[in-house]
Image: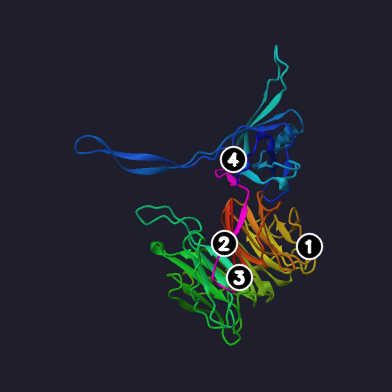
Amino acid sequence: MTEIYNARDGAAFVQFAPGTKPHYLGECVTVDSAPNPQSGKDPIFCFDRYRRPKQIGKNITMPSLPSLTLTTLEQEAALYMDYIKDAKCEFELLIGLSKCYDKGVLSNHKRFYTYGGVLITNDMPNNPISRDSDAAIEHAWSLMPDLGRATLRELTFARVATSETAVLNDITGCPSRCADSCGARVEPCQHLAGAADTVAAAVPDVIISTDRGLTFTSPASGFAAGESVKAVQCVELAGGTTRIIAVRDTDAANPLEINYSDDNFATNTLVVVGATNGEAAYGGGSLFALDAEHIWLATDDGRVFFSDDAAASWTDQTTALAASGAAVLRAIHFANSNVGAAVGAGDVVILTTDGGTTWTAGTATGSGDGLNTVHVFDSNRVFVGTDSAVSASPAYMTYDWTANWTTITEGLDIAGTDTVEDVMFLEDGRTGFLVKNTAAPVGHVYRTPDGGWTWIETNVVTNAGIESIYACHANLAFVVGQVSAATSFIGQISG
């Protein structure tokens, strides 16, 4: 994007926690800079045989925490900052940039710098008394955030050409790494994988990209003709090998199956999961991999299976079935190896804090809607998206492990028949992406800068419905969905 922003286009917002309602600090606020310290290098030297210094290596040093100064006049903004200071708690800071419309409305902003875990380390009135100047009294606040500023740029959308003709149900990215003596560099989203429906009862494909989404191939998934691939995940094995794991829909005569491949599905290994004929994965959110030793699979029979060996074998976490009441589980997500949740039809939420050894029923949102997607931030905060079947409420957030739920509507523009199909937040817990389909269906994509309270829509090209999104970082994501103009729909969102 070529549009130039000026300082007058900026506005500051604060939150007491990610995903809560932001507060506009008002006019007459200055932020001097928005630093984002990075790692450094410390060279390792030795003298060579001729006594000359020679660099033989380097150590990577840790970055320091950022610091910035927010300055206000002694008015409403200063009073609110005093309120935050007196609470002595960390908070969130969002700096938005908007060329048009009211700067006090967060969703009017197109670019953001966001910080989490901000602590006020000092506050100081400037110019409280002057012998010969009538300058306005200002109040400066020294702020120290956590490491990791998020920079959100304005997004554009482009369709990726493909010869695949199937509906695409899911897309995921594989782990990235820096180049070193262990191997070559792998960029974020350099390696992508997707799940395809069957076409005319043929053998279903997966889709693979190894060039950051520029091109996709369509190798056969290894499942039987007439079956469809519903979800995919990607993990790294010992030695840097990439394993792609795919799960299928129902087969009335056989139990659930997964296929995995370590060579982009040139070959694959079929694994039977469970013993119930007809059991299946519902959709793209059914399979979740934290790493090769922590993989969970939720099923349409209300079960959760777990693998600690990169999908080679699976254990039935039996308490999930009792907790779900045998409802269709549509999505599962874990914040870490212990804390996770699965959601499904009939407003069902099940929770675990021990990696799934024990599952318990959570408190439903109360909407009566089916829950299509879930993201777990920690053992307090959980976000869910719905099918709007009963209440026409698009999404909910809980801040107390489902004891209470807050309806999320800001910016989503949801009609009664719209459905939230997928959601993904980045590691910072502030930046996230959401996919919504209208009844037509037509897919829409949103991004949040504030942990899921406010959603800002990005322009998309013509489509017949979007099913899944994978975010590489705050300014790059890929979506897949229903067939449009006779070929599979793959979209790239970038900024």
Left or right side of 16 for 242: left
The residue where tag 1 is placed is: 415
What residue range appears in magenta? 144-167
Residue at the (58%, 78%) spot, across then down: 198
Residue 91 location, x and y as percent? 66, 42
Residue 452 location, x and y as percent? 68, 53
Question: Comparing marks 2 and 1, which lies closer to the viewer?
Answer: 1
Which amino acid type is marked by label 1? Ala
On the question of residue 111 being in view, the answer is: yes
Which amino acid type is marked by label 4? Pro
Which amino acid type is marked by label 2? Asn
**Other residues around mark 1 within 10 Å, as few (<14) / some (14–19) / many (≥20):** few
Point out which mark residue 338 bears: 2
Question: Comparing marks 3 and 4, which lies closer to the viewer?
Answer: 3
Q: CA distance from mark 3 to mark 4?
A: 38 Å
On the question of residue 352 being in view, the answer is: no
Circles 2 and 1, Cβ within 8 Å, touching? The answer is: no
Which picture quadrant has residue 36? top right
Q: Does residue 317 lie above or below 469 as drawn?
A: below
The residue where tag 3 is placed is: 169
Residue at the (79%, 68%) spot, across then down: 390
152 in the magenta segment:
yes
Question: Which of pointers 2 and 1 lies earlier in the amino acid sequence?
Answer: 2
